[in-house]
Amino acid sequence: MKILFLTAEAAPLVKVGGLGDVAGSLPAALRAAGHDVRVALPGYGAIDWTRWRPKYVSSVAVRRGAGDFAAHAFEADVHGVPFWLITGPPIPKDRTIYGSGIEEDGPKFIFFSMAALWTAQANGFRPDVVHAHDFHTGAAVWWLATEGRHNEFFARIASVFTIHNLPYAGQGAGRALGEYLLPKADAISILPEGFRDSLLGLGLLGADEISTVSPTYAREIQTPEHGRGLDGLLRARSDRLTGILNGIDVDVWNPATDTALAVPFDVARLEGRAADKEALQREAGIMSEAGHPLLGVVSRLDSQKGLDIAVPAVRRWLELGGQFVLLGTGEASLEAAFASIELDFRGRASVRLRFDAPYARRIYGGVDALLIPSRYEPCGLTQMIAMRYGAVPVARRTGGLADTVIDAGDAGGNGLMFDEPSPSALWDALERLLRVRADPGRWRELQSRGMQTDFSWTRSAARYTGLYERARAARQG
């Protein structure tokens, strides 16, 4: 099939979160399966244009009430995948990616979405499926479902719309929709109040098929607790809603070849992790003692990630002789809380409030366990990377965490799970972790199972192929 990806970010060109990982890896897996995939991405100034050397391919006019805007497309080859970088007046030339609100992001992403469709036409690339990601691309899906049905080039093109994080809905985009002459949905009662000018809501309403990034999250977002006001619409479209678990690039995340590690290792050479743990302890400025259990966090620091409930549990962990390393930035209150932990437990706790990709790899390769206490987690890649590197995840049973981490008390266990989002429930899981770790044979089993789990994109790409087929059959029917 011919597939056009629309995304606001994609690694390695530009990445803010998990969306960037997916949009950077899934197209390559689909191309390896024989599909013709092109990726459209805003041509931000934050992209290293000198490194990727994109070549000009076309210019198109994007219709606008106050006068059309010209969009210019440049093509870059990114590890064998063609990327169209779309530039034009609303796309920032500085290093910003996301703006301060919908007043900036609405016009920017609507312009990009429409420009990407017109660029495909200008280059004679008629996709079987447009695969759009998150609210930033909802305008393209909505246009395909409405005016696009009367356009000879686009009429039979199917759409798949993927939710990566439901709370980011692009609400309040009515003015921008009007600016770009897109039809509104004021009279469509299935859209709840407050979402009739939501780019995410319009994408969900117009898509031939909807996906999200794990089976459990697909069920959770159909409930009032996790649906964020869109659960009714999602239940109404549940026959078109599929959860497909994300993957990771197993070549990029490979402890056997990772040059960031002091000693590379694999499942057959797990003893190499001891040297990586000692190297991490030295780098973090904590005591280099193999017998001390080392707990790690690599995360954005906010309430979604549940790091607030982790603070008292981490303090107790340290009071009982454990060690702790953290890498991340986020809410000021959480940064302060963890910084105070380092001050109170010098030599046993290390907190680095920054982004540091090589150091993150050394944490994955050196800690005994990785803490992931999320309140909700659409998919999560951290737990997959941790297991790939032999770190045992301690995670809350939600979203993609529930689909990837199996509790040590169950058959095939590869981690420790807890249910209630509370410090006491988390502490119970940490206590069980210590009991399992006291049995070297059982502990190695947990590590080995995690390292041998297939988290590659190959399996996910096959499921997306099936989803594209359903979307195409629905549109052609």
Image (cartoon, helix red, strand yellow):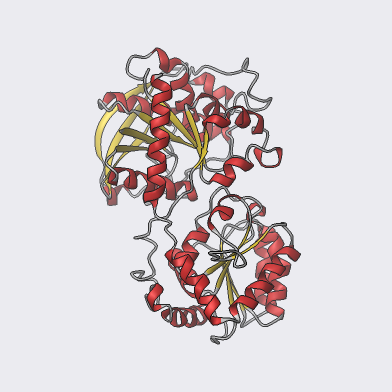
Q: Residue furthest top?
A: 150
Would you say residue 89 is visible in this rendering?
A: no
Query: For the point 34% across and 60% down, which residue is it?
Result: 251
In the rendered image, residue 43, in percent from the top left (x then y), is placed at 37, 39
So how many labels did they put on this image?
0
Give the quarter of the image for residue 275.
bottom left
Query: For the point 42% across and 15% down, which residue is it?
Result: 149
In the rendered image, residue 299, in percent from the top left (x then y), is placed at 56, 60
Front in this rendered view, residue 346 or 440: 440
Rendered position, 266 above or below 302: below
Rendered position, 313 above or below 280: above
Rendered position, 285 above or below 155: below
Query: For the point 43% across and 39% down, which residue is it?
Result: 7
In the rendered image, residue 173, in percent from the top left (x then y), is placed at 57, 27
| Residue 192 appears left or right of 365 | right
Q: Residue furthest front?
A: 411
Give the quarter of the image for residue 74.
top left
Image quadrant where one finds the C terminus: top left
In the rendered image, residue 67, in percent from the top left (x then y), is placed at 42, 17
Would you say residue 187 is visible in this rendering?
A: yes
Front in this rendered view, residue 30 or 88: 30
